[in-house]
Amino acid sequence: MELTRVEEILGGKKVLHKKIQDQLDMVDLIEQGLTKESAIHLAKALSITNKRLAELLPISRRTLERYHSKKHLDRATSQQIISLARLTARGFEVFGDRKKFVEWMNAPCTALGERTPISLITTQIGIDMVIDELGRIEHGVYY
């Protein structure tokens, strides 16, 4: 299930200090603020550096680096992390393999204007476009 995968991508119950059982749990996590540790787990799932992660979030690299691993991030940053974790969970589901998904994220995609999917996920609209493309891939519709 996607929620279980999102929880795993963000570091599991050990990092989140709760189990994600429904959408309301994600709302609560956003309002409380995810920790830097959750963000680092997301970076590992996407096979990106912390520098690249900061480029995908509404936070500067220096600020992210200064945060202690247990420090809670603001609501906007937490929202973006949850959105990216949901996208990542969906990608793992569609490709059935983390490595294949990461390769796809870093390859130009015709349906996305020859841009790499990872280059688009700095905004919610970009995330939605990539999720839509994953849906087309899942159903065998290629451009």
Image (tube, rainbow, N blue to C red):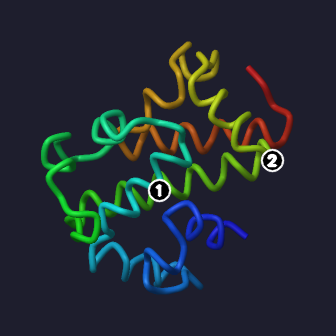
Mark 2 lies on residue: 96
Image quarter in which the N terminus is found: bottom right
Q: In the image, is residue 99 above or below residue 91?
A: above
Q: Residue at x 65, y 72 (%)?
A: 4
What amino acid is at disc 2?
Gly
Q: In this view, does 95 lie above or below 79?
A: above
Q: In which quarter of the image is residue 110?
A: top right
For residue 120, the mark is none
In the rendered structure, the answer to whether residue 135 lies left or right of residue 64 reads right
- Image coordinates of residue 46 in percent, x first then y, are 54, 42
Relative image position of residue 117 (x, y in whole percent) = 53, 29
Whether residues under marks 2 and 1 lie with C-beta atoms below 8 angstroms apart, the answer is: no
Picture quarter with the C terminus? top right
Name the foreground residue: 12 vs 6. Answer: 12
Q: Gap between marks 2 and 1, in whole Å?
A: 19 Å
Which of the 4 image quadrants contains residue 54? top left
Mark 2 residue crowding within 10 angstroms, few (<14) / some (14–19) / many (20+)? few
Which residue is denoted by mark 1 in the rendering?
Answer: 41
The x and y percentages for residue 15 are: 44, 74
Callout 1, which amino acid? Answer: His
Left/right placement of residue 119 relative to residue 138 reads left
Tell me which residue sits at (21%, 63%) in the image: 68
Picture residue at 55% right of the left edge, 81% below the top: 20
